Image: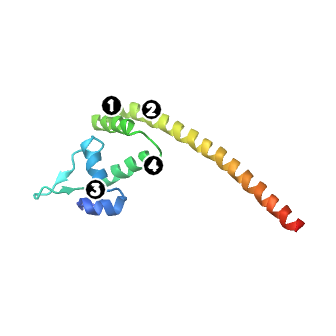
Amino acid sequence: MNSELLTIEQVVARTGLSAHTLRYYERIGLLDSVSRATSGHRRYDAKDLDWIAFLTRLRKTGMPIRHMQKFAELRRQGDATITERRILLEAHQQAVQTHIAELQHNLDAITVKIQVYSQMKGDHDNTH
């Protein structure tokens, strides 16, 4: 995909995001202004796709849009903001790890309940 430029429809197919979401991300500053063909249609390159993939990961792991916007703004400012970006990602990483621990705790409780019901069913089947 070296210098291949993709239409918004092609990016939708590759990323699973809707065209509306891609335009929204551009409008709110998550995506830099995407290049345009002479027709005015958006054209995305490999760097755009990489960035969209990272934004998708942030979103899927629960990062609020306002934090994503802060991260995108810091990224635009260049290497002088690497420490700030790392700190922001470390805070998000901690939030994700906490959420995973909560999910695991709840999953463990569900597993125990299933075991109880399985045992009760087995006991019930053995008495009849």
How busy is the neighbourhood of tag 3: few (under 14 within 10 Å), some, or many (20 plus)?
Answer: some
Say if mark 4 contacts mark 3, CB within 8 Å.
no
Q: Which residue is mark 4?
A: 60
Q: Quadrant of the N terminus?
A: bottom left
Q: Which residue is mark 2?
A: 87
Q: Position of residue 70 (x, y in %)?
A: 35, 34
- In 3D space, how far apart are the residues under numbered discs 4 and 1 (Cα atoms)? 27 Å
**SS at circle 3:** helix
Q: Quadrant of the C terminus?
A: bottom right
- On residue 80, the disc is 1
Q: Earlier in the sequence, mark 3 or mark 1?
A: 3
Q: Residue at x 80, y 62 (%)?
A: 121
- In 3D space, how far apart are the residues under numbered discs 2 and 1 (Cα atoms)? 13 Å
Q: Amino acid at mark 2?
A: Ile
Q: Earlier in the sequence, mark 4 or mark 1?
A: 4
**SS at circle 1:** helix
Q: Amino acid at mark 1?
A: Ala
Q: Which residue is mark 3?
A: 19
